[in-house]
């Protein structure tokens, strides 16, 4: 049984003077993720690496799952720790590592050594040669292959000595929290949860806003959005989900404005309201799941009209993604099955048969003038009656 995990990071290693800030963010996120599994893990920073020491009797699969959800983890390696740094103990630990973890010894290997402790009496090439020779003596089936070894037998000598052979890919990206906060417009569809996941992967905390239109959209549709937020919160951390009642505004637009402009006008009001909430929550951007040309409201022309009402930058991580690529990510992160549940969305209820595909901002502004009487009051009401649900990862 491995006693620890070695965490390798990629991009953070390229940082200059503020590298330790990013490392601290990563340590914090690893601790947070492991808290859901157990409370006696020790997470420690060493130059260029992070080590997780596991409590006695820990659950391997749960631990790996928790590590695999932390952005910033480029690779993780299950490791065994030697009982001391004495040479004889190291050799004994190497032998028992192979006995315990290498079932098929009819294979090739090469020994790698990282010597973090520069005062250790043996140098790396000597450690590699001596461990290699000892393993060959102990396991005559093993063969050395220095070019293309199947087993990369690695010994890291630091304050303690760590042994590992396997390395698994983590999710990559940057640790959440190292890069400010954004407001995700979260619907019950496939795209927006993926967009939230992706922006969060760049180290951004997210909060979310969902527009619902009771009684046209049901409690089940709201529950679906809550469920989606909970799934992505496993990666992003806690989310404040703002639930805005959009019925009144939607009906008003429907009754007052040309029907072919309906979706764009609705999207413009969604963006305005989400931006107001975003600013209250200190968010530095809005995030949507839009992708060029996916539907009429996402043509280049439509996106200009939606963008025109925002002061904050609007990030659209999926802008150049094909639907099938988005679906693949949503399956990978576990949102797909929930996203495809067939509950109504407030946008789909009033869609025009022939929505405009090349709207222009001036025309949208002209139509919005028709709403002057009541729209400010309605927007105020939508904001003041919003419900905030705190979503915690489970
Ligand atoms: P999704 O799969 O994310 O629902 P979609 O393909 O259905 O996207 P649209 O309905 O045009 O696309 O919505 C585009 C984007 O607008 C969504 O990705 C989401 O960010 C936002 N959005 C749409 N409807 C809502 C809603 N009811 N509440 C919050 N945001 C929404
Ligand atoms: Mg949608």
Image: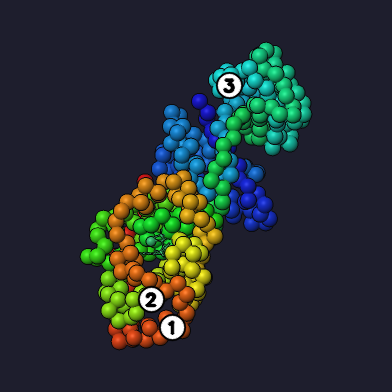
Vertical arrangement, residue 270 with respect to residue 342, above or below: below
User: What is the image's colouring?
Assistant: rainbow
Disc on the earlier residue, 3 or 1: 3
Q: Nearer the viewer, residue 189 or 174?
A: 189
Identify the residue at horizontal 40%, vertical 43% (top origin). Answer: 36
Q: Position of residue 274 (x, y in %)?
A: 40, 70
Quadrant in which ligand 1 is drawn? bottom left
**CB-based contact (under 8 Å), mark 2 and mark 1:** yes
Identify the residue at horizontal 65%, vertical 20% (top origin). Answer: 107
Does the image show residue 367?
yes
Q: Nearer the viewer, mark 3 or mark 1?
A: 1
Disc on the earlier residue, 2 or 1: 2
Q: Position of residue 217 (x, y in %)?
A: 26, 62
Instruction: Specify few, some or many for label 3: CA neighbours under 10 Å numbering under 14, 14-19, or 20 or more.
Output: few
- Residue occupied by mark 1: 363
Identify the residue at horizontal 71%, vertical 34% (top origin). Answer: 115
- Residue occupied by mark 2: 261
Q: Nearer the viewer, residue 379 or 158?
A: 379
Disc on the earlier residue, 3 or 2: 3
The number of numbered discs placed on residues in the rendered structure image is 3
CA gap between label 2 and label 1 equals: 9 Å
Mark linked to residue 102: 3
**CB-based contact (under 8 Å), mark 3 and mark 2:** no
Vertical arrangement, residue 310 with respect to residue 238, above or below: below
């Amino acid at each position: 049984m491995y006693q620890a995990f070695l965490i390798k990071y990629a991009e953070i290693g390229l940082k200059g003077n503020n590298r330790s800030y990013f490392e601290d963010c990563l340590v914090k996120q690893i601790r947070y993720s492991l808290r859901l599994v157990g409370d006696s893990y020790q997470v420690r920073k060493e130059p260029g690496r992070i080590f997780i020491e596991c409590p006695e009797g820990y659950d391997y699969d749960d631990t790996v799952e928790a590590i695999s959800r932390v952005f910033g983890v480029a690779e993780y390696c299950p490791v065994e720790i030697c009982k001391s740094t004495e040479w004889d103990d190291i050799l004994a630990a190497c032998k028992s590592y192979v006995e315990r973890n290498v079932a098929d010894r009819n294979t090739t290997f090469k020994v790698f050594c990282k010597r973090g402790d520069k005062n250790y009496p043996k140098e790396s090439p000597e450690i590699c040669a001596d461990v290699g020779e000892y393993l060959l003596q102990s396991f005559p089936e093993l063969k050395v292959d220095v070019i293309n070894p199947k087993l990369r037998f690695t010994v890291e000598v630091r304050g303690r000595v760590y042994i590992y052979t396997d390395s698994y890919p983590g999710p990559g990206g940057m640790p959440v929290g190292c890069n400010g906060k954004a407001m995700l417009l979260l619907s019950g569809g496939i795209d927006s949860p993926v967009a939230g996941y992706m922006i969060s992967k760049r180290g951004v905390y997210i909060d979310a806003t969902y527009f619902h239109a009771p009684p046209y959209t049901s409690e089940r549709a709201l529950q679906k959005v809550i469920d989606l937020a909970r799934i992505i919160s496993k990666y992003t951390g806690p989310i404040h989900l703002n639930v805005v009642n959009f019925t009144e505004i939607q009906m008003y637009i429907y009754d007052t404005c040309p029907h072919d402009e309906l979706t764009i006008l609705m999207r413009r009001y969604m963006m305005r309201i989400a931006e107001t909430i975003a600013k209250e929550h200190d968010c530095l951007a809005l995030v949507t799941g839009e992708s060029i040309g996916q539907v009429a409201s996402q043509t280049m022309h439509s996106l200009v009209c939606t963008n025109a009402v925002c002061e904050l930058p609007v990030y659209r991580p999926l802008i150049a993604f094909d639907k099938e690529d988005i679906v693949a990510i949503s399956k990978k992160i576990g949102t797909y099955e929930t996203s495809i549940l067939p509950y109504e969305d407030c946008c789909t209820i009033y869609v025009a048969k022939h929505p405009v595909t090349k709207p222009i901002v001036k025309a949208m502004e002209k139509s919005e003038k028709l709403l002057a009487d009541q729209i400010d009051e309605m927007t105020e009401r939508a904001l003041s009656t919003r419900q905030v649900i705190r979503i915690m990862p489970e």
